Amino acid sequence: MALSRRLLLGRLAATGAAGAALAAGAGPARAAEPAHGGGRGVRTGFDRLAADGYRLLDGHRVGIVTNPTGVTPDLRHIVDVMHADDRVRLTAVFGPEHGFRGTAQAGGSEGRYDDPATGLPVYDTYNKSGRALADIFTASGVDTVVFDIQDVGARFYTYIWTLYDCMVAAVLAGKRFLVLDRPNPVTGRAATGPVLDKAYASFIGREPIAQAHGMTVAELALLFNGEFVPQAAGRPVELETVRMTGWRRGDFYDTTRLPWVPPSPNMPTPDTALVYAGTCLFEGTNLSEGRGTTRPFELLGADGIDRRWAAAATELALPGVHFREAYFAPTFSKFQGKTIGGVQLHVHDRAAFDPVRTGIGLLVTAKRVWSGFAWRPDHGIDRLTGSALVRTMIDAGAGPDEIVAAWQQDLERFRTVRRRYLRYP
């Protein structure tokens, strides 16, 4: 590809304009259809990049930020596929939280090593940002950084902030950036929940977006580049995106005909992702969020909780979900090896279900029925929700409706900004 065309594609993608064939959603070649039943069938950004002969990477030394979710429909890892293809010059891999091959638990990574399967150098990006991350990109010798990781749609899932940090670092290192899109597994219908207050920024929320953002990673990249990267790095990154074909905003993951690979150890199924944007808030409390069970984020509980919590949650009449009295013994994390009581969420109408509102309702009722309820001493709940609003309102006795109403003005402002960067019908 000629340099002038690469630059044109970068400008088009960075501004969200249509015209470049891959960025616009048209593909010159037909890839093999996934072997999973149901739905229209979705072709991911990588599928379309490969079908186009990697033209967007022509002549570039390429490094890729990915993890075990970076797979083809037949479950080959894209690093293995690209490494074996002489049309692309893959020279480095960058691993996020949990690592490139996925060997680390929450809050961990794999460090710097050479990948045994390909011999490629793997660099650790977890908890690195700014100049430190830019120096890693520089040391790797790549020209273009590619990002391809499956997200789950929640602000506090760290991969989208790895995306953001890598975009900022790419500016500082003078690197080009390419995002390969994958579905938002819980649809992209709407943004819900509180918007981050920058005073509470951390690696589980760098910039003011909604708790459930309702965007794909490529859409988020466009939003980051248009709204936040210039403030952090002085200018936008040279950004290109490769969109999916076959995906619509109302599609849940099981309609895509794509295989599900857990993006992290405690995200085993798309059902987990469906509730995660709400029930992950229990990480900010002394209750178990279900880590160490076969249903993380669907099972919640603590020692001393009984049937009254499920009854109180049911009385809220939250749409799309039932609550069952449940008892379980986590194999690790909070209450390891101890049988505790709590609830299990059963989503019966996922179109009506609001995970954030449900999470707030569960926090409110847990505090009301269990005298042992406590926030984590470090006020991690404030980083999860994006401010002190939720914690202080619950402590003051507010109900779910009052709490949800309190963030609507900020949410509407975010929704207005978000609409400018949506790319799927």
Image: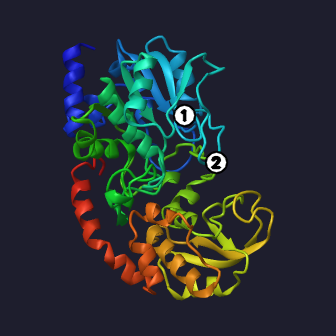
Q: Give the CA distance from mark 1 to mark 2.
A: 17 Å
Q: As displayed, is residue 355 above or below residue 294?
A: below
- Closest to the camera, between mark 1 and mark 2, is 2
Query: Callout 1: few (<14), some (14-19), or many (20+) C-alpha neighbours within 10 Å?
Result: many
Residue 408 falls in image quadrant: bottom left
- Numbered circle sitting on residue 265: 2
Query: Percent position (x, y) of residue 113?
Result: 61, 23
Q: Is residue 362 above or below residue 116?
A: below
Report the residue at 54% width, 22% height from top.
81
Q: Secondary structure at mark 1?
A: loop
Q: How many discs mark residues in the rendered view?
A: 2
Q: Nearer the viewer, residue 262 or 304?
A: 304
Residue 175 visible to the viewer: no
Quadrant (top left, top right, bottom left, bottom right) of the N terminus: top left
Q: How far across and down, in percent of the image, does residue 390 sit? A: 42, 73
In this rendering, the answer to whether 280 lies above or below 136 is below
Camera-side residue: 229 or 199?
199
Mark 2, Cα crowd under 10 Å, few <14 / some 14-19 / many 20+, is: some
Q: Position of residue 292 (x, y in %)?
A: 71, 58
- Left or right: residue 55 versus residue 236 is right
Q: Is residue 95 visible?
A: yes
Q: Nearer the viewer, residue 131 or 123?
A: 131
The type of residue carrying mark 1 is Val
Task: Look at the numbered disc 2 and give the secondary structure of its residue.
Answer: loop
**Mark 1–mark 2 CB contact (< 8 Å):** no
314 is higher (above) or lower (below) than 153: below
Q: Which mark is residue 71?
A: 1
